[in-house]
Amino acid sequence: MSGPRRDWSDTTPLLSPQHYRHRGGSASAFSDRGSSSFSGRRASASLEMATVAVPAVPTRSVLLSVDVGTGSARAGLFDEDGKLLGSASSPIQIWKDGDCIEQSSTDIWLAIFAAVKAACSLANVAGEEVAGLGFAATCSLLLDADGSPVTVSLSGDSRRNIIVWMDHRAVKQAEKINSSSSPVLQYCGGSLSPEMQPPKLLWVKENLQESWTMAFRWMDLSDWLAYRATGDDTRNLCTTVCKWTYLGHAHMQQVDEKDSRNIEACGWDDDFWEEIGLGGLIDGHHAKIGYCCSIVLPRESESVLLGAAILGAVASKKYSSLSDAMKALNAAGQVIHPAKDPKVKKYHDAKYRISRKLYE
C-alpha cells in the first residue's frame, strides 16, 4: 500500500470527504535539500514548489460492503474484479423478553465501525481507496427522532429502538389487519406475517403512545444505515415492497421515454393504512415511512439470464473482469422517479380506485 492510512473514529461518517496528503515528503525536507544543493535563487524556487499541495490519486478503487445480521455486523472489501481482499465482523447486542426481541442502532453503528476498521487493517486498505459503499441488513424496524433513537421497548430503555425481524409481539395486530378485505393483501401471499412492519407499527401505536408521537422516521434497518452514512432518506424498493406493502408495480407508466421523471411510481395504498388504523402515516406524502422510491429497471427483456451469461463470459476468459463484461453485454439501467405533475398522480389514483372496486 502506498501513502499514509487515514485514521478512523467512531464519530466520523463512513462517507466523509476524502483528504489526501502530499506523498513526496514534507515542505521542510524539500527546503533543506534545496538550500544545501542549490544557490539561494534556486533554493527559493524549490521551497515555492514544495509548498504547493499536490493531491495524491488513489492507486486502486476498493468497494466496501457491510452486512448487518442478527448477531453481528460484517464488513468486506472487494476489488473491482469482485475479489475479496479482507473481511471482519463485530458482535452486536440483542435483548430478548418473550416474544419481544430488540436491538440498538447505536450499538450496531459502533459494531460496523469496528468491523470496517478491522477489515481495512487486514486488507491493508486506506480510507481514500474506498470508492463505494453498500449495505445489507435484516428487515428489522427502527424508530428515529431525527437522529436520536426512540424506544420500542416496554422497559423504556431508549437504546432499544429496533424491533428485530423475528420479533412476534404483533401477532394480534397481524390478525386484525388480515381480517380486512384490502387488495394489498393479495400481494403478500394473502396475509401479513407478524414479522412485517405494519403489524409492528400498529403494536407500537397501541402500546407505546409516547414513542409513537416522538418518532420522526420509521425505517427498515438497511435504509437507516444508508441514511446514517449519507444523509439521503430515499427508501429501498426491496424493503418497502417486501415488508411495508409498497406496491412496486403500481402507478408506473412511461409518459415520455426521454424524460424518466414523468412517471408515477407511488405505490402506497392510502386506503389500506387508514383501514388498519395507521392513517397518520400518509401525512406529508408518507414522509415517516418513505417517499416514493426511485426504481432502476433493466432495459433487457431477460435481465436475469443476461446476468448469468455475464458470469459465464468472465469464466470463459472472454472478458478479464465483471466490469468489462457488464459494459460490453448490457445497457445502463433506466432510472424512473415519482412524477411531480399532480395531473399524472390524479389520473393514476383514479385508475387505481377503479381497479380496487373491481377487486372488491
Image (tube, helix red, strand yellow):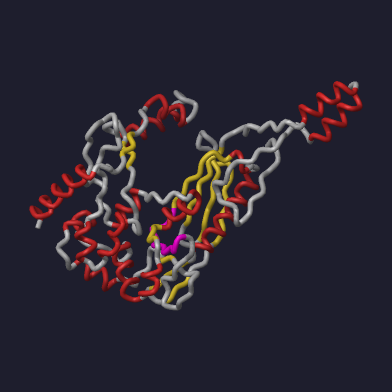
Quarter of the rendering occupied by the N terminus: top right
At 30% from the left and 52% from the top, the residue drawn is: 241
At 81% from the left and 24% from the top, the residue drawn is: 45
Whether 155 is drawn above or below 10: the answer is below
At 51% from the left and 41% from the top, the residue drawn is: 132
Q: Residue 20, position in %: x, y?
A: 66, 38
Report which quarter residue 123 is drawn in.
top right
At 26% from the left and 48% from the top, the residue drawn is: 266
Quarter of the rendering occupied by the C terminus: bottom left
Residue 86 relative to residue 237: left or right: right
Q: Which residue lies furthest to the bottom in this view?
A: 155
Q: Residue 209, position in %: x, y?
A: 35, 74
Q: Residue 347, position in %: x, y?
A: 16, 44
Highlighted magenta segment, given as a residue range? 137-146
Report which quarter residue 37 is drawn in.
top right
Q: Residue 141, position in %: x, y?
A: 39, 62
